């Protein structure tokens, strides 16, 4: 997991997502995680190291039904570089 620029993420969601309801239950209450996670290709439960795509995602969770939407943190521009993390 890595820290993200939460303010920048919320601004990105506000601009792109606006006030979209949950597609499952229609609620408009979301919980945005403050860390990004890795999404990798599944290899039957085996951890495969080496080349291959890893997608950094931020879970956005509906607080009513638990539906989870993943936002690519690189596309959103919210990943913090190592130097920035050390200076905080």
Image (cartoon, helix red, strand yellow):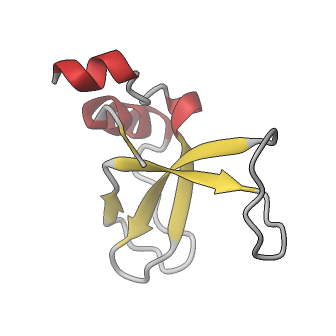
Residue at left offset 31%, top offset 31%: 5
Q: Quadrant of residue 83?
A: top left
Q: Residue sitting at 74 percent across and 50 percent down?
A: 49
Image location (x, y in percent) of residue 1:
43, 49
Residue at 54%, 48% (x, y): give it: 57
Residue at left 43%, top 83%? Answer: 65
Q: Percent from the top left, x then y, of residue 87?
A: 18, 18
Q: Is residue 71 left or right of residue 34?
A: right
Q: Is residue 75 above or below residue 19?
A: above
Q: Position of residue 9 (x, y in %)?
A: 37, 36
User: From what the image shows, is residue 69 above or below residue 82?
Assistant: below
- Marker count (numbered): 0
Quadrant position of residue 14: top left
Residue 73 x/y as whole percent: 51, 37
Q: 67 or 82, which is in the foreground?
A: 82
Foreground pick, 13 / 51:
51
Q: Nearer the viewer, residue 87 or 66?
A: 87
Q: Quadrant of the C terminus?
A: top left
């Amino acid at each position: 997991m890595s820290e993200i620029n939460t303010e920048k993420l919320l601004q990105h969601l506000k601009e792109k997502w606006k006030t979209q309801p949950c597609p499952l239950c229609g609620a408009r209450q979301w919980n945005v995680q403050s860390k990004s996670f890795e999404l990798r290709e599944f290899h039957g439960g085996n951890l495969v190291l080496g080349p291959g795509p890893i997608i950094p995602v931020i879970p956005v969770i509906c607080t009513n039904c638990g539906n989870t939407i993943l936002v690519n943190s690189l596309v959103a521009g919210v990943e913090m570089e190592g130097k920035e993390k050390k200076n905080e």
